[in-house]
Image (cartoon, rainbow, N blue to C red):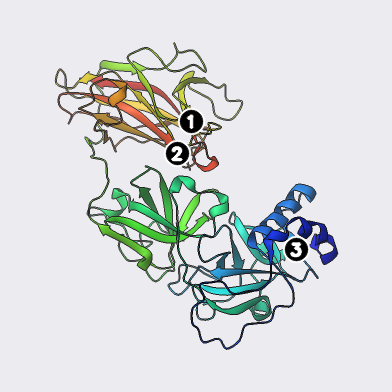
């Protein structure tokens, strides 16, 4: 078992003296009933330093868990979790500062409820001796070491491990965009502005609850969309929460919650302390207009347009056949792609590929638009295609239709583009080595002339730099 002792830390702390602090009150103290500040006879380090110690252990010794024995070290933090509504269980989430925090940690403890002792905004000190730091569900966590896992601290050890300070602070949510999510932002109390729940979850006769649908086995997962960016994140709610049966709000606004990962530690999730932190006061939603002709039972024999990309030059931009291959933002466009399956993701011969991996783009928006179709000269139009991905992460690929685009690339972004919701496009949790058919999508309800296009949205950050592949596009009619 790898441990940390005082004499082993001397050189490290000399280099990080600015990060080490004494126990002191901050400027935003609030009145409370605690009579005296606790006396901490030890060295206080920040949560950032705690994370650095773990990273050092991983890089130098290859261990994913670091245990503390006779180190006489403490961390401090402000409680940002609240288990009163039952959506959080046997854990305290702490962040380093009440305002403009930079790092947080989850303290696992076998006690419920915790809000009666460690309320939201309460400053606490955590004694590190006897504890271990590692990752639980993908986020930085403190607890008892059990083999290669960090597990919950026993109830009998709570009082000597977690010490309540007299300070009760007003937590100010850190405003952030979904595209700015990162591992370093997990375990922080965040505010997402200008967001709404996906219309398929929040609107219509089948409006969903937070977590009381028949398919919600452990958690309800609902799509939360950014109106400003086009990105989305899963809001995860426990089926044991008091508010699981409340219907999702239908409006648009801001939401405060804790950033974490899903159970597998690979996809960002937002978690609420309570639905009272949702403020969707605007009824002006940002949904795309839908062109929903549904799925067609048959496919006509007349081919209006087809593309299998076999004539394209591998690793070069998609050209010819009437395509408009346009970069709205960033540096990436659609390129011809080939793989024999050696990487587990074979192409269908030559395919079209789009992604922002290693692009360093702050924003990547790319379009691939078919030539204009006149829907009045035939009937029974359908479209079929296939998609695959290489870990699409938080990036998106959507199928859109425009009746007012004039064919000039400079006006793509200012034209009206409506979604075609019947099309199935590969999802991030689909197996990356498979190709998924779109379904036989009817276009028969469209009149006049217009354009059908694929729009990719991502950026160069690790969690939004996914890749999509596209192939076997056929538009038929009777």
| In front of the other: 4 or 362 | 362
Residue drawn at 49 percent across, 12 percent down: 313
| In front of the other: 355 or 87 | 355
Q: Quadrant of residue 44?
A: bottom right
Cβ atoms at labels 1 and 2 below 8 Å apart = yes
Residue 67, which numbered label?
A: 3
Residue 395, which numbered label?
A: 2
Residue 453, which numbered label?
A: none
Residue at mark 1 = 355
Residue placed farthest to the front in the image?
27
- Kindly state the secondary structure of the residue where label 3 is placed: strand
- Kindly state the secondary structure of the residue where label 1 is placed: strand
In the displayed structure image, the side of residue 259 where residue 222 appears, left or right: left
Which comes before the other along the chain, label 3 or label 2?
A: 3
In the displayed structure image, the side of residue 221 where residue 264 appears, left or right: right
- The residues tagged by marks 1 and 2 sit, at their Cα atoms, a distance apart of 8 Å
- Residue 230, x across and y down, in percent: 37, 42
- Residue 130, x across and y down, in percent: 74, 71
Q: Quadrant of residue 301?
A: top left
Cβ atoms at labels 3 and 2 below 8 Å apart = no
For the question of whether residue 264 can be seen, the reply is: no
- Residue 379, x across and y down, in percent: 16, 22
Q: Looking at the rendering, in which quadrant would you find the C terminus?
A: top left
Which comes before the other along the chain, label 1 or label 2?
A: 1
| In front of the other: 470 or 28 | 28
Q: Residues within 10 Å of mark 1 (few under 14, many from 20)?
A: many
- The residues tagged by marks 3 and 2 sit, at their Cα atoms, a distance apart of 37 Å
């Amino acid at each position: 078992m790898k441990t940390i002792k005082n004499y082993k830390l001397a050189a490290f702390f000399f280099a990080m003296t600015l990060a080490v602090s004494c126990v002191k009150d901050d400027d935003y103290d609030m009145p409370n009933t605690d009579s005296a500040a606790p006396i901490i006879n030890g060295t206080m380090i920040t949560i950032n330093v705690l994370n650095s110690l773990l990273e050092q252990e991983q890089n130098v010794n290859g261990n994913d868990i670091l245990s503390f024995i006779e180190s006489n070290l403490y961390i401090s933090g402000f409680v940002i979790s609240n288990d009163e509504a039952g959506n959080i269980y046997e854990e305290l989430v702490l962040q380093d500062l009440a305002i403009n925090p930079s790092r947080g940690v989850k303290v696992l403890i076998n006690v419920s409820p915790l809000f009666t002792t460690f309320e939201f905004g309460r400053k606490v000190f955590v004694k590190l001796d006897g504890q271990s730091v590692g990752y639980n569900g993908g986020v930085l966590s403190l607890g008892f070491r059990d083999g290669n896992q960090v597990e919950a601290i026993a109830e009998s050890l709570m009082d000597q491990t977690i010490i309540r300070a007299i300070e009760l602070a007003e937590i100010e949510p850190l405003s952030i965009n979904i595209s700015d999510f990162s591992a370093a932002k997990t375990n922080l109390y965040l505010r997402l502005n200008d967001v709404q729940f996906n219309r398929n979850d929040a609107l219509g006769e089948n409006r969903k609850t937070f977590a009381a649908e028949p398919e919600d086995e452990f958690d309800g997962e609902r799509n939360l969309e950014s109106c400003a960016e086009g990105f989305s994140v899963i809001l995860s709610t426990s089926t044991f929460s008091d508010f699981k049966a409340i219907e999702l709000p239908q409006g648009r606004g801001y939401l405060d919650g804790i950033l974490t990962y899903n159970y597998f530690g690979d996809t960002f999730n937002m978690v609420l302390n309570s639905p009272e932190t949702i403020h969707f006061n605007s009824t002006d939603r940002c949904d795309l207009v839908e062109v929903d002709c549904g799925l067609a039972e048959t496919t006509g024999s007349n081919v209006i347009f087809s593309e299998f990309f076999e004539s394209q030059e591998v690793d070069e931009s998609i050209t010819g056949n009437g395509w408009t291959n346009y970069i709205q933002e960033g540096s990436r466009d659609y390129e011809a792609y080939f793989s024999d399956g050696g990487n587990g993701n074979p192409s269908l011969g030559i395919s079209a590929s789009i992604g922002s991996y290693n692009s360093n783009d702050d924003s990547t928006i790319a379009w691939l638009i078919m030539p204009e179709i006149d829907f009045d000269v035939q009937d029974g139009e359908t479209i079929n295609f296939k998609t695959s991905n290489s870990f699409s992460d938080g990036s998106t690929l959507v199928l859109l239709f425009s009746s007012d685009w004039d064919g000039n690339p400079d006006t793509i972004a200012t034209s009206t583009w409506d979604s075609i919701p019947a099309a199935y496009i590969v999802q991030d949790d689909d197996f990356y080595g498979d190709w998924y058919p779109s379904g036989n999508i009817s276009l028969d309800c469209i009149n006049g002339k217009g354009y059908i296009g694929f729009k990719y949205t991502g950026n160069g950050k690790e969690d939004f730099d996914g890749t999509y592949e596209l192939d076997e596009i056929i538009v038929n009619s009777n």
